[in-house]
Image (spheres, rainbow, N blue to C red):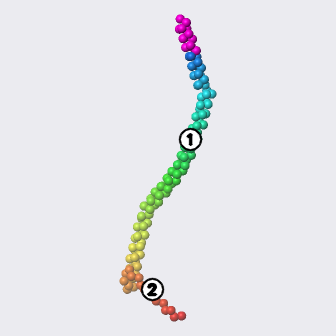
Amino acid sequence: MEDQEMQLKVRRVTDKFTESMYVLANEPSVALYRLQEHVRRSLPELVQHKTDMQSWEEQSQGAIYSVEYACSAVRSMTNSSMYFKNIDGLLRQAITLKDQINTSQGRSPHISPPPPVRSTSS
């Protein structure tokens, strides 16, 4: 009987001790301390990640700007094909008119006349 009573008392004491330890381990001030400890350990790494991400964002923005500028240049080149076709037509027309002028003056087309010879007597 005494043995059972002793075991019951020991069990109560250990249960109370376990409960006290649980309360102490989970007390708000201990939780805040552990939270502060965690923040102090992880904050420098998070700051480094943030700095890296900002740097990568700047580099990405620069690359995006370059690509958009290149695309814009290609689009404007594509749109300028009608101007080049117009220039080509005008050049062909000018060549035809030059040939007509040369033919009317009795010269052969596409051959430039020799430059006039100047006398060197002064």
Q: Earlier in the sequence, mark 2 or mark 1?
A: 1
- Residue marked by disc 2: 115
Q: Which residues are magenta?
A: 1-13
Kindly identify the amino acid type of the residue bearing the numbered disc 1: Glu
Above or below for 82 versus 40? below
Residue at image x 46%, y 57%?
71
Furthest toward the front, the residue is: 3
Q: Is residue 66 left or right of residue 88?
A: right
Kindly identify the amino acid type of the residue bearing the numbered disc 2: Pro
Residue at image x 52%, y 53%?
62
Is residue 100 something one can see in this rendering? no
Question: What is the tally of numbered marks visible in this picture?
Answer: 2
| Most common SS among magenta residues | helix
- Residue marked by disc 1: 45
**8 or 111, which lies in front?**
8
Above or below for 121 versus 34? below
Above or below for 117 versus 41? below
